[in-house]
Amino acid sequence: MRRAGLIIGLAAGAGLLLAGQLRAQDGPKSVWDGVYTDAQAERGKAAYTQSCVFCHGPDLAGTGEAKPLAGPEFLSSWNGLSVGELLDRTRTTMPQEHPGSLERSAYADILAYLLKFNGYPAGPTELAQRSEFLTGVRIDAFKPDALKPAASAADAFATDAFATVADAAPNSQPNPYASDTGFFKLPPGRTMGSSSAVGVDSRGHIWVADRCGANNCAGSPLDPVMEFDGKGNFIKAFGAGMLLFPHGLFIDAHDHIWLTDGHSQAGKGAQVFEFDASGKVLRTLGKAGVSAEGPDTFAEPNAVLVTQGGTIFVADGHTPGRSPQRIVKFDASGKFLKQWGGLGASPGQLEMPHTLAMDSRGRLFVGDRGNNRIQIYDQDGKLLDSWRQFGRPSGIFIDKADVLYVGDSESRAPVGYGHNPGWTRGLRIGSARTGQVTAFIPDTEPNPDKQSTSGAEGITADRHGVVYGAQVLQKAVVRYVRK
Ligand code: HEC
């Protein structure tokens, strides 16, 4: 699995081109080349102590939600990206309560201190204050092999260190989580049905759309869309009679609850709903009961995602081997803009685009479940990368810090549906930036090869890193907390 490395390598290549235009192509290529001075790092330490130490700690190890800025977690999440990207990220988001409040020189100095603290050598010139000059300076976690001549930027990037990141044996990562299957307290008489739809709103409330205590809401009087507080207490529910088969749930920047209904019958289904938090329907996309591929209809809408700016993406097509299999893009008013994909296994094509997520750089992650891969597109449908190291994706969630959570509910050995030999079902957690998988929570179903689904199909995490997996077979939403 070297594609991830290659693509980021190509991105680094594009960075080199830009740097070339700035006549800096002969400058440093990586953090190993001595890209800051000792005096600058000293100043950076003082600035860090003033503006960052409160949250990130004196040893840069992080405290609470503030991430570590040194050590393996930090390095694996930035490995392969550029110092320019780290500078931009820091200047536009930090210090958390007053982003951009420091002088440009102070940000550069603090970065110099971070590089020194992480063991990278000082050199003769100071780190530039403008990220444009730093796009060609790669953060290589491990020292590149100086004897290996690099034919191209991509080759230079495909170091063994990175290869092990993506080539790690499937299912081999540690499971640092404890699971809780009884967290959600439902109203008396009600039990959790099958679910693939879970999300957390800005207040930390958890929203679950179950399939009305069963695996289908048709004819049920129950309210499938349920709100729980952060302790798992039931708050309220709505949606009775409106949905047949709640499938994909997304909570947007206004805490509106978006849901797809994957089934259809006369006058109902095959739609996308936008609810406000009180349960009022703000709008629908698609035509109720019309299952078809069109600019204003869906066949089987699996998932919906809304960007900060309001652009809407819908993943459509749940039947293997049958069209449509597409991503549909709408503007914020709901006007159809374009679609892409198409049935197949070639790069960019899709089979069961089951789930959607977006990283902090605005890349759209599509769980191309039938092809056992995640496809990463730009927002106009250009394929940027294709990852297999997260298994067969039914659910994908990416948090604000680009931690990637993927639920694999289908991998199995026998030839036929779900065929993905060597991969076991469960939740894989890693980095949306580097593609590294760092944790694996195995599914608990003892006979996965006899079941077409088990474990989480829907997945989310709150801002403390607590993970929720919504399960179809087990009819449960399980909470996972770091041990
Ligand atoms: C009020 C607390 C707070 C302060 C002060 C603060 N940070 Fe952060 N920082 C956070 C939190 C929380 C995160 C994780 C969430 C996020 O990425 O936005 C974070 C994330 C980061 C990250 C991203 C790490 C990664 O790998 O994703 C960097 C880099 C960073 N901070 C640098 C800084 C620097 C440099 C300063 C000082 C100028 C600073 N922070 C001040 C709370 C803080």
Image (tube, helix red, strand yellow):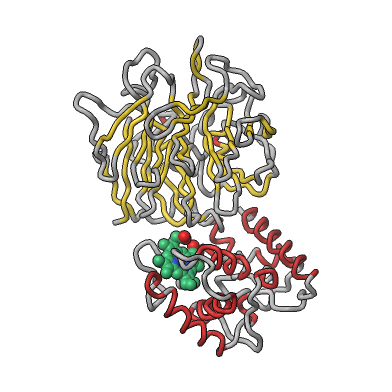
Residue at left 69%, top 33%? 338
Q: Is residue 474 above or below residue 298?
A: below
All told, the count of numbered labels is 0
Q: Nearer the viewer, residue 448 or 197?
A: 197
Q: Is residue 282 above or below residue 391?
A: above
Residue at left 51%, top 33%? 418
Q: Is residue 364 above or below residue 85?
A: above
Q: Quadrant of residue 185?
A: top left
Q: Nearer the viewer, residue 434 or 321?
A: 434
Q: Quadrant of residue 130?
A: bottom right
Task: Say whether residue 457 is visible.
Answer: yes
Residue at left 26%, top 37%? 184
Residue at left 52%, top 30%? 302
Task: Say whether residue 69 is visible.
Answer: no
**Residue 357 percent location from the top left of the image:** 53, 43
**Residue 424 percent location from the top left of the image:** 44, 42
Q: Nearer the viewer, residue 204 or 124?
A: 204
Apparent side of residue 372 relative to residue 449 in the rendered image (left or right): right
